Each structure stands twice: as C-alpha cells, then as structure tokens.
Amino acid sequence: MEGVVDAVVDRLDGERVAVVRLAIGKLAGVDVDALRFCFDVCTQNTTLAGAELDIRTIEPRARCRSCGGEHAPRGLAEPCPCGSFDRELLAGDELRLVEVEVL
Amino acid sequence: MCRTCGCDDHDHPHPHQRRISLETDLLAKNERIAEAVRARLEHDRVVALNLIGTPGAGKTTLLEHTIRALSPTPMSVIEGDQATDHDARRIAATGCTVTQVNTGTGCHLDASMIERGLAAVRPRAGSLLFIENVGNLVCPALFDLGERAKVVTMSITEGEDKPLKYPHIFRAASVLVLTKVDLAPHVDVDPARCIEHARKINPELRVFPVAAPRGHGMAEWIGWLRSELEAMP
C-alpha cells in the first residue's frame, strides 16, 4: 500500500487526489479487502488522504504448455482441464496503478 | 463522497476533477532498484540468492552448514529480521562476512535494503551472497531484491500441504530446500507428497531435501551452489 502512495505522489505535482484506480489480478497474491483496509491508514497526511479507492479485479487466464489450450484457473495449484500442471499464467497476477483523478 | 461537490453519486460528471493516466506497476519503484542491484551484482560477478521461509524453517542453520561446507569459497550474508542481530552473530561465528538489516514492523526485505546491505558487506568478485529474508512465506514473494534466484526453504515439520496453502512463493522461487527431512517419520509427513504439491504450483522447481546438521542431502545442495558460481560468465 505504501507502494501505491509512492507511485502516485512521485508522478504528481502535489495535486490533491480524489480517486485512485487500481487493477489487481485475482492471483496477484494481494488481498483486496486488506488493501482497502490499509488505504485509509497509509494515505493519512498525504495528498491521497480521503481519496476514493476504485479497484478493478482481473480474472486469471492461463495457457497450458502440454495441450496448448487456454483456461481460467481459480488458483495457482489448479491444473489445466487436460490434467497438466505445466502452464503459464497469461493474466491474473497484475498489480497495476491505472490512473488517478485529481482536484 | 466527492469532496468538492459533496455528492454521493459517482456517475455524474465531475468537471472539476482531472484524470491522469499513470499506468504503472505498483511495485515499479522496488523493481527499478532491484534491476540496478542485479546489474551491479552481475558486473561484480556475485551470485545472490534470496532465502525465503517461515520463522523456524531452518534458514540460518542451513546457512551455517552451507558456509562451513563451501569454505574457503568467498561468501557474504545479508540477514533480514524484524529485530535483533541474533542471526548475524550466528553467521559471524562461522567467519563469514555478514550484516544485519532490521525491518522493524516490516514483513519483508525490499531492494533498497539490499543496496544498503551491499554497502556494508561489499561482496568480492566471484563470490556467493546469501540474503536471508524476514521469516515469512507470504510477502517476500512479491519483492524482487535483484537476486539470481529465490530459494524457498520449508521444513518438513510444517506439513506437506504448505505449498498449496502458500502457492505464490513456490511459483516465484526456482529452488526449494526442504529442511529437517530426518524428522519426517516423527511427524507423519511424507516428503515426496510435499514435493509433489510444490511441483503442482511450479513444475520446474529444483528440490533439495536436506537435514543440514546431519549432512543429509547437503552434497547435492552444495554441488548446485558450486555449479551456479561456475556458470557465472
């Protein structure tokens, strides 16, 4: 969460931030509820204080290296429907700051 | 609530607000520093390994036995803990160069801490640098430290299902050192099942089952470390 504050503050010229938009993959290893919980704490006394946190979650997609097919895994330990565990995550591990709205 | 007009409706236009596209990774700052650390280590011909595991997984014990087995190969250690210099003192007792980084309330090391650690240990060309992360199987998975490889250490007493319960670190790591395997019969855990679970997350994971104080499996682990040093250009 401190990463969010740094990433925003470093790119702005001190404007007050009204909205922060993030894109978080469901398999990124970050709990969105925990992120929301610490946002208010971490933004205190910064230009982000009081800002709205808008989080878009990104559904996971993986490509299987055995059968070549794509599937939507629900977890990192879930195999391809063909049974293979040899797969590559195409989407779902994002931790991205998309944009902000400033006053 | 909109702080300028006081409305609760986010769908109506807010002409007083300006959108600024930032499109950046949330960990970009750490990753920039980590890339600088990686470039410096490559230039200095230092092989850095980031050891990650729960408190009590046996990371420091593994390091003590590894350092003694590899001596006189040049090595250094950056020790991460929330508090105390206990681990740094244990490593110093082996004769190895070491510095302790205390993170306070922090649950992981980040790349800027490694920059400071490097200034303290000044690793020699052609040496191994072990970075012992804060005991935690969760957050360190997200933070690149500029290492050559992440090594997850897990003791067999933690239970064979831990790779499934904490999959992110097993995905991020390229090596698993399964420690305390001599205790497996006493805790009714099957190392083979544990390894099978870990490879469901990461089929390419290289695995070394060891019992460091007994020397079990250490020859293979030490052999891999030597091969990493020799593979350095």
Image (cartoon, coloured by chain):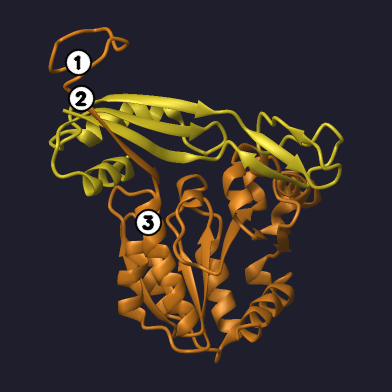
Chain colours: A yellow, B orange
- Picture layout, residue B13 above or below residue B191: above
Co-location on one chain, circles 1 and 2: yes
Q: Which residue is mark 2?
A: B17
Nearer to us: label 3 or label 2: 2
Q: Is residue A33 visible?
A: no
Q: Amino acid at mark 2?
A: Gln
Give the x, y percent position of residue B53: 53, 54
Q: Chain of mark 2?
A: B
Q: Nearer the viewer, mark 1 or mark 2?
A: 2
Nearer to us: label 1 or label 3: 1
Instruction: Kindly identify the residue that appears in the image at 45 percent across and 59 percent down.
Output: B133
Circle 2 SS class: loop
The alpha-carbon separation of the residues under discs 1 and 3 comes to: 32 Å
* Residue closer to the observer: A88 or B127: A88
Disc number at residue B30?
3
Q: Secondary structure at mark 3?
A: helix
Q: Which mark is residue B2?
A: 1
Q: Decide: marks 1, 2 in contact (CB < 8 A)?
A: yes
Question: What chain does mark 1 sit on?
Answer: B
Quarter of the C terminus of chain B within the rendering: bottom right
What's the CA distance linking mark 3 and mark 2? Answer: 30 Å
In space, the residues marked 1 and 2 are separated at their CA atoms by 10 Å
Vertical placement of residue A3 versus B224, above or below: above
In the displayed structure image, the side of residue B5 where residue B178 appears, left or right = right
Among the 4 quarters of the image, the one containing residue A41: top left
Residue type at the position of mark 1:
Cys
A52 vs B198: above or below: above
